[in-house]
Amino acid sequence: AQKVTQAQTEISVVEKEDVTLDCVYETRDTTYYLFWYKQPPSGELVFLIRRNSFDEQNEISGRYSWNFQKSTSSFNFTITASQVVDSAVYFCALSEKGGSEKLVFGKGTKLTVNP
Amino acid sequence: DADVTQTPRNRITKTGKRIMLECSQTKGHDRMYWYRQDPGLGLRLIYYSFDVKDINKGEISDGYSVSRQAQAKFSLSLESAIPNQTALYFCATSDKTGTDEKLFFGSGTQLSVL
């Protein structure tokens, strides 16, 4: 069965610090998709990234970067030079074969960025 | 206006009452989902629908029912609410084109069952 573990329940940093949110996953499938979603204090979840199991290239989008390593079954998310607006709960999720009906979420990591 | 709209945003009800949460979308997506979020537990899928005639149970469907009234509308009902159904409920949509599928969420409905 598929499983997503976000071991960090809460993280608190000071503005401009770099922070990495960990995500470890379990699946028996060779084809799968990994996601990160952001839930700001307003409550609505926002899609950040989708990565398939055949693409291990790291991705950078502005201050956000993702490190996908199949060898350690990890898909970690780094925010560089954090800002107060990055404060949110971040969810990692896994879908076998890509269908959202099979999407399994981790329990989330609450990030607080203090000024 | 939001692409995925949930009503109400907040609801307090009593044990045993029937309650309906509504979701409408303007994204033109075929696929719609209902999730619940509990503190420290992430999101869990309740029901999903791939089109008007296709309804499927998710991970935690017991105690819930759904209705897909139209492509744009998907409602969630609690026939007889109980306190452990107190949670934040999210509706989501997706448009699976090729292999690119991602979820678009509503703002959530906070339900409290007393």
Image (cartoon, rainbow, N blue to C red):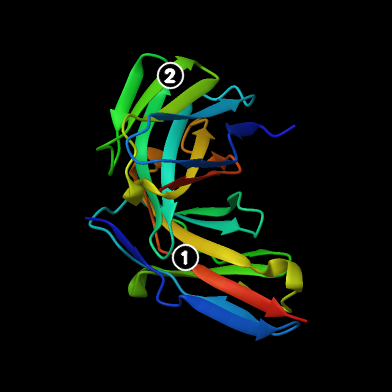
Residue appearing at x 66%, y 32% in the figure: B3
From the viewer's perspective, tell me whether residue A26 is left or right of residue B31.
left
B29 up-or-down from A5: above or below: above
| Inter-mark Cα distance, 1 to 2 | 30 Å
| Quarter of the image that includes the N terminus of chain B | top right
The number of discs equals 2
Which corner quadrant of the image does residue B24 belong to? Answer: top right
**A82 above or below A52?**
below
Mark 1 — on which chain does it sit?
A: A
Residue found at x 43% / y 50%: B87
Residue B22, x across and y down, in percent:
52, 28
Q: Mark 2 highlights which residue? A: B68
Rendered view: B71 above or below A53: above
Front residue of this view, candidates B11 and B34: B11
Residues B9 and B41: in front is B9
Q: What amino acid does circle 1 point to? A: Gly
Residue plotted at (42% across, 15% down): B52
Whole-percent x and y of residue A1?
A: 21, 55
What amino acid type should be assigned to the residue bearing mark 2?
Arg
CB atoms of marks 1 and 2 within 8 Å: no
Of all residues shown, which one is farthest toward the right?
A115
Residue on which the image places disc 1: A108
Q: Secondary structure at mark 1?
A: loop
* Residue B114 shows up from this direction: yes
Chain under callout 2: B
